[in-house]
Amino acid sequence: MEDRLPAKRRIRSPPESISKYFDFDFSNFKLKENHQELPLWICSNGHIFLETSAPSYLQITDFLIAIAEPISRPEHIHEYILTRYSLYAAVSVKLETEDIVSTLQRYSKTLEIPSSVIDFININTAQYGKAKLVLKQNRYFIESPYENVISDLLNIESVRKGKEAASDVNMEIQESHVEDVKEEMIRIMDGENPEDIEKVESCCVANEYIPQIRQDCHKENFPLIEEYDFIKDDKSPRLEIDLKPSTHIRSYQEKSLSKMFSNGRARSGVIVLPCGSGKTLVGITAICTVKKRAVILCTSGVAVDQWKRQLEMWSTIDPALIACFTSQNKDCTIDVAKACVVISTYSMMGYGGKRSAESASVYEKISRVDWGLLVMDEVQVVPADMFRRVIFDVKSHCKLGLTATLVREDNRIEDLNFLIGPKLYEANWLDMQAQGFIAKVQCIEVWCPMTAEFFQEYLNAKPRKKLLLYVANPNKLMTCQYLVKKHEAMGDKIIIFSDNLYIMELYSQHLKLPMIKGNVGHSERSRILFNFENTNACNTILISKVGDNSIDLPGANVIIQISSHFGSRRQEAQRLGRILRPKINSMDNDFNAYFYSLVSQDTQEMWYADKRQQFLIDQGYAYKVVSLTEEIQRQNDLMFYKKEDQKTLLEKLLQARDMDDDIQVDPDDITPEAMSKKSADAFSSNTSTTTSRSYQIQAHSRNRLFADRYKKFKKNK
Ligand SMILES: Nc1ncnc2c1ncn2[C@@H]1O[C@H](COP(=O)(O)OP(=O)(O)OP(=O)(O)O)[C@@H](O)[C@H]1O
């Protein structure tokens, strides 16, 4: 290998970097004698490249995850970038500035690391820990042991307004907190000398200003630490809950929780683990550690059931202390003043319209008390306008976000840094696959040529009709049927994903397959999932986007995706996650799960497919591209094999009006507004001007369509 990196390197720009490309010249940096054994190339703009062949790869990986954002982690070279949020996360898990710099210097291949990197680290670690946000008796206090930090913070308009709005707080309440505050801040300073007590300052801010205050403090480089001293908190009732002796948490689950808990305190933040790796048990273990009342938020009613089931399976909690608050189930009997666990959905808690009397009373109870822990499953949905308020209506001392896909198409994922807290831990999918914790999945993109008649109509069709024609391409439908036959014969369990309802219903009728879509009720969904998981009577099911995440089907090992939500990287990863649960032969080297993405050739679908796959490619997955045309031609019993059937289908599609994607009418599912917001944003940032304008119009009209139909549904409910 050359002594020096090639002088010019070009990489795909990460979301937060300013320049589209970066050029970095290593020629000014001398290499260490033993640079071959060392793993790191550190560039002046904060990009860090890690060679996985280096002997110290594993220990330096944990360190890099703690201080930097992973951008791309294929097999041989991983790429990270230092950001201020990643450095906040590093300081929040007690990494000191000097340790960060010295470790980078120790593992760098070059004798020195760029001074710009050292300056960036110093600036963005110096401010962290200067101020803390504490919840006491339903009121928020900003506290700091550092001189005049409170007065600096009061220069931030929202902090000043929040303090003024709280000024009507009864002074003796505020006074009585001063002692607690002093006591508390001594603990923050880890027992520094008592004469610092007079420096400890605090100001009470009104609850309604908290979201803005957190955002502004982050922007002003004054991130507010949110740590919860749950052991010392004798004001909140204790929740009697422990993990059962038979519950053994896995090494990566333990490691992720070690970033959240230290010295008897819990820090707010986000834990990122692959789909199917057991995020539910991580959340349950966090509740068992804090032992205070907790709220768990999920994206659907099915997920609420799974959390309840796993709480009872893994912990010793009395089932009577678990309350589910969903559209079907409003446990209003639960006494939240006592220790309990409430499991609800973002839609139920985030709903801004008029609530029924019983729903309003439950909501009032929940928002009136201090919660020890707020656990947010699929936390990537929280930055959406209609959900972000939830995390402040549910006042909690500590917040834990769980996700497999920390991506959004509207780039608002960074808001989680101030809405919840820094990213505490992120696992490497390929490492976990190598250790057998998740299945070894082969990703296959199947190119399906358009038939001449369909392609002719496609070229002249309007955008929405184009979408329908490339989804209903007969060669794609036959390919899907061929794959179902092949894998059912191998004893596999198959999930067919289609956002488009018309195609789902076509398949369901022709192939006699059960389907789960937005308007399939909760009990019917559970029945279909149970039969699929536990009987051989049902080995293939059709699911719309309502099944993208959280549905736990350990037996499923094949996915066939025939239509999807434009270029959503999150959806692609979440769907792959349905078959990531570890399989019996997980330690073998060969593949034990298959993810087929059927794409109509020479259509826009190929562009979307390329964009959708980026997140998984960055995790190290490689898509194999195949064509099954020859195999299909030999199967004359497939539906739409005959030309006249294809012609009939085409005529129906051209006349059809109402063939939209599923709009998830079950009120517990993430609402169409949040989904359509994503579809609108999916095009604002990534397509060329020509297509983006048409798709923005289309996305806008889809938003309106979703929103109108959703409102109609709600009114009729
Ligand atoms: N420590 C463990 N020991 C045994 N089984 C486990 C453990 N952790 C998780 N599991 C099992 O792994 C499966 C997947 O867990 P879970 O549904 O929590 O994954 P997840 O990360 O939430 O997936 P998704 O992102 O798809 O929601 C479940 O069947 C769960 O019981």
Image (cartoon, helix red, strand yellow):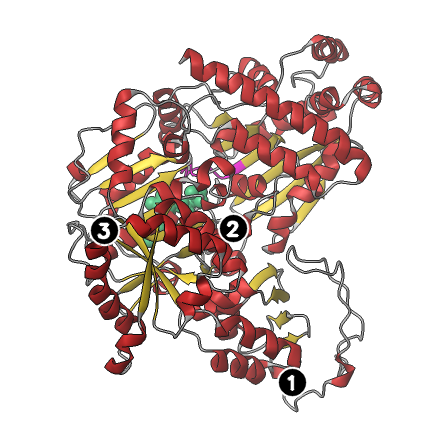
Residue 3 to residue 504: above or below: below
Please tell me which residue is depicted at 22% across the width and 61% down the height of the picture.
175
Q: Is mark 1 within 8 Å of ligand 1?
A: no
From the image, tell me which residue sits under label 3: 170
Question: Viewer-nearest of labels 2 and 1?
Answer: 2
From the image, tell me which residue sits under label 1: 35
Residue 416 to residue 388: above or below: below
Q: Quadrant of residue 36?
A: bottom right
> Which mark sits nearer the N-terminus, 2 or 3?
3
Please tell me which residue is depicted at 61% across the width and 81% down the height of the picture.
108
From the image, tell me which residue sits under label 2: 415
Whether label 1 touches label 3, CB < 8 Å: no
For the residues labelled 2 and 1, the Cα–Cα distance comes to: 38 Å
Residue 423 - label: none
Where is residue 8? Give x, y as percent.
80, 71
Label 2: element kind = helix
Q: Which quadrant does the N terminus fall into?
A: bottom right
Q: Is residue 312 magenta?
A: no
Where is residue 490? Give x, y as percent.
52, 35
Please name whichever residue, 285 or 379, is drawn nearer the observer in this view of the structure.
379
Residue 341 to residue 33: above or below: above
> Which mark sits nearer the N-terminus, 2 or 1?
1
For label 1, count other residues whose C-alpha is less than 10 Å away and answer few (under 14), some (14-19) or many (20+): some
Q: What is the span of residues highlighted in magenta in the rendered image? A: 550-558
Q: Amino acid at mark 2?
A: Asp
In the rendered view, does 635 fall on the left or right side of 95?
A: right
What's the magenta bit mostly, secondary-structure-wise? loop
> Which mark sits nearer the N-terminus, 1 or 3?
1
